[in-house]
Amino acid sequence: MIIEYTRLTEHIAAEVVGLDLASGAESIDGEALRSLLAEHAVLVIRDQHLSPPQLLDAVGLLGIPERQNYSQFNHPEYPDIGILDYEGEQKPADMWHTDHTNRECPPNATILYALKVPSRGGDTSFVNMNAAFLALPGEVKRELEGMKTVNTFDGQFEVRAADQRDFGRQVEHPLVRTHPETGRKALYFHVLKASYVVGKTAAESRLFLNELLEASIRSEFMYRHQWRPGDLVVVDNRTAMHKVHDDYDRTEKRLLHRVILKGDRPV
Ligand SMILES: [Fe+2]
């Protein structure tokens, strides 16, 4: 089966059309979907109707699901699904980031599936950090390529003892990583999970990373997704960063299921 798609912006995101993920993974060309994701960094697949097991079956086309950082947000019956409902202590990640950099092998991809969305706002934006990196001056690029971040939990939520044991070790990552399939280099960090940049203090590191986001990210490298129920969006975390727009009426429901896929050690 040929995968049909249209590009959503010049630098990032493609919408896949004519795909019914509930029809069963065996009828869909997973390899074509994976290479489309590597090429465009974000895939949008609208109008899906997926129960939790159907969602897990469908994302199996793209990789192997793994447990997320904060087990208190796991789906009670399907713990490979994280529930994003931003109620209680949960709040949207409204700054640019890539997911789970506290892992030695952070997830290759994150899948977001919308069940309920507010009448306005609560969009998710994605940015191509390969394009952002390439647009920097040559000497800045060379300097960044030698730098490393040291990462751990960001302390935003309560960390359960088992999660601390499984995911709480400090890990070092290159600030610029090379995508294993495309060979493209991208800026790679999570400001809150980076305890520090090697050679800088924690305070210097925070300022440096925020300034780097400011200097490198441009609107033309972005795609802003306005959610509808049934939207499934996949982001390649090796190329793109994302953020949630925390601008919606919090008395309205915004409920997404999230799955992360096992990744490689960034190089
Ligand atoms: Fe995220």
Image: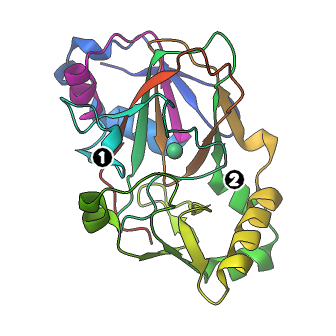
Residue at mark 1: C-beta within 8 A of ligand 1: no
Residues 254 and 187: in front is 254
Q: Tag on residue 131?
A: 2
Category of crowding for the residue at label 2, using alpha-carbon neighbours closer than 10 angstroms: few (below 14), some (14–19), many (at least 20): many
Given residues 195 and 114, the one toward you in this image is 195
Q: Is residue 151 above or below residue 240?
A: below
Q: Position of residue 197 (x, y in %)?
A: 61, 79
Compare residues 38 and 85 and report the one nearer the observer. Answer: 85
Q: Which secondary structure, mark 2? A: helix
Q: Position of residue 184 (x, y in %)?
A: 55, 60
Q: Residue at 31%, 64% (x, y): give it.
A: 164
- Which-is-in-front pick, marks 1 and 2? 1
- Give the residue displayed 25% in from the left and 22% down from the top: 52
Which element carries disc 1, helix, strand or loop? Answer: helix
The numbered dot on residue 267 is none
27 to 168, vertically: above or below: above
Q: Which quadrant is the N terminus positioned in?
A: top left
Residue 51 in magenta stretch: yes
Q: CA distance from mark 1 to mark 2?
A: 34 Å
Task: Name above or below for residue 253 compared with residue 200.
Answer: above
Callout 2: CB less than 8 Å from ligand 1: no
Which residues fall within the magenta stretch? 40-61
Give percent across and percent down for residue 133: 70, 62
Q: Which residue is mark 1?
A: 71
Rendered-image quadrant of the C terminus:
bottom left
